[in-house]
Amino acid sequence: MKVGILGGTNLAKTLGKKFLEAGLDVVFGVRSDFNTELPEWKILNKFYNRLCPYESAIIQADFVLICCEDQYLPAICESLQGVDLDDKIIIDCTNKLESLNLSSSNTLKIQNAVPNAVLFKAFNNLGLDYPEEDVLGFVKETYFCGNSINHKKQVKRLIELIGYKAIYAGMLENAILLEAFYHLSQEIRRNRENNDHYHFKLIAV
């Protein structure tokens, strides 16, 4: 099983390291102008030879995690359209930051670009700067949603493989709710006097 992670963000790098430590084969897809000489990325490329263009990473992977900034999503969608996605699971890990209009979420953009792909959303509660927003490692769960019941267990196992509790949140239409949770946490932070980060935890009573 091979994981392809698209984007040059802290989240991409951190999830990639976790999957590598868990024994999975990982490839990172980055844009053509990405600075591969940045220290941690240079080390990843030197020891694992794992940095390549988006399309190459998608072709190689069984699971494709999208961990990019908003402005690079169109290029990733174009790369997704250019390859055979049969037997691949796409996981959107992003939150649309350019607008709080959740009716046009990143997940919807990806779904519109590749309507026949197996698409899930997960890990977006961590944020693209993770783990800088959780330096002590308190966040141990992530919510995920998607329409393919046949692939639900595979996504759950992938999440749990790197130590997170996987909480299923229903069909892909609920991706906007998962993004809303992230934006709410950011609003809480902005309206507090301290500079702490805030996360949600599911509690059954």
Image (spheres, rainbow, N blue to C red):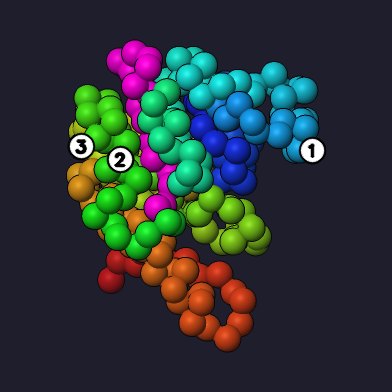
Q: Which residue is mark 2?
A: 109
Crowd rating for badge 1 (residues with CA inside 10 Å; few <14, some 14–19, many 20+): few
Highlighted range, magenta: 80-96
* 177 displayed left or right of 191: left
Q: Is residue 150 left or right of residue 96?
A: left
Q: Looking at the rendered structure, which numbered label has been put on residue 147?
A: 3
Q: Earlier in the sequence, mark 3 or mark 2?
A: 2
Q: Are marks 2 and 1 in contact (CB under 8 Å)?
A: no
Disc 3 residue type (three-letter): Asn
Q: Nearer the viewer, mark 2 or mark 1?
A: 2
Q: CA distance from mark 3 to mark 2?
A: 16 Å
Instruction: Residue lying at the far bottom in this picture: please name it.
Output: 193
Which image quadrant is residue 152 in?
top left
Which residue: 49% across, 38% down? 72
How many tags in the picture? Answer: 3
Q: What is the number of the mark on residue 39?
A: 1
